[in-house]
Amino acid sequence: MNNYSDPALDLMTEALLVALSAASRETGAHSHRTAEIADTLASRLSFTPDERASLRYASLLHDIGKLTSDPAILHKCAALTAEETAHLREHVAASVEMLDRLGFPAAVVRIVAEHHEQFDGTGYPARSSGDSISRGARVFALADALDAILSDRCYRKARTYTEARAEILRCSGTQFDPLVVAAFISIPAERFQ
Ligand SMILES: [Fe+2]
Ligand SMILES: [Fe+2]
């Protein structure tokens, strides 16, 4: 784990995660797992202790804005309407607003703001691409996707690590930064399981 952390931010993060887990146990668990995966990737990519700390807070709190999502839509298993999808996408702005108001550092807020951007510019909300997306958010995107693929959803079963690896390789250069994919591929599978 990182060497750097701030006791006040740690306490706030803990409190927010208790609330998030109460609203959605799966989102809380996903946040913790994603932080572990992202930190493993960050260590391989030689992030500084400060960069790792920012990425850790951002990973733990990326979906905190889901506290403001309509629970009926958040937990809906059937296909979402366009309106429902748009509603759920607002969690990014809500996360940013909450963390900004609570005084989280700009580097943390930026990763959270960019956590659904994609390398080829097809993500949301800003459709940023390539290096204009922060390095932390480019690493985070892979961690978020890996955990999603390895987890059960109400509409599908978890896939295997081998399937996840193939899927991530397939999306190198489109959804993901190729340098982050290369770092991921170079790490033994056991570190993620
Ligand atoms: Fe999200
Ligand atoms: Fe996520």
Image (cartoon, helix red, strand yellow):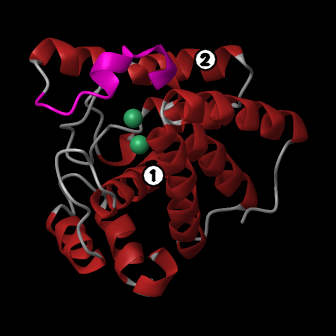
Is 45 left or right of 13, judged from the image as shown? left
The residue segment tinted magenta is 66-79
Which residue appears at 20% of the width and 21% of the height?
A: 85
How packed mark 2 is, by other alpha carbons closer than 10 Å (few <14, some 14-19, many 20 or more), is some
Q: Position of residue 90 (x, y in %)?
A: 35, 17
Q: Position of residue 175 (x, y in %)?
A: 22, 52
| Depth check, front residue: 172 or 33 | 33
Q: Position of residue 79 (x, y in %)?
A: 10, 30
Is 32 left or right of 66, judged from the image as shown? right
How packed mark 1 is, by other alpha carbons closer than 10 Å (few <14, some 14-19, many 20 or more), is many
Which residue appears at 70% of the width and 51% of the height?
A: 53
User: Alpha carbon of mark 2 to alpha carbon of mark 1: how far?
Assistant: 19 Å
Q: What numbered label is drawn on residue 98? A: 2
Which residue appears at 41% of the width and 84% of the height?
A: 189
- The quarter of the picture where residue 105 lies is top right
Looking at the image, in which quadrant does ligand 2 appear? top left
Which image quadrant: the N terminus?
bottom right
Q: Which residue is mark 1?
A: 140
Q: Secondary structure at mark 2?
A: helix
- The answer to whether mark 2 and mark 1 are in CB contact below 8 A is no
Which is nearer the N-term, disc 2 or disc 1?
2
Which residue appears at 44% of the width and 56% of the height?
A: 139
Is 58 left or right of 170, judged from the image as shown? right
Q: Secondary structure at mark 1?
A: helix
Tell me which amino acid carries mark 1. Phe
Q: Is residue 135 above or below residue 124?
A: below
| Depth check, front residue: 122 or 152 | 152
Tell me which amino acid carries mark 2. Met
Q: Position of residue 157 (x, y in %)?
A: 21, 59
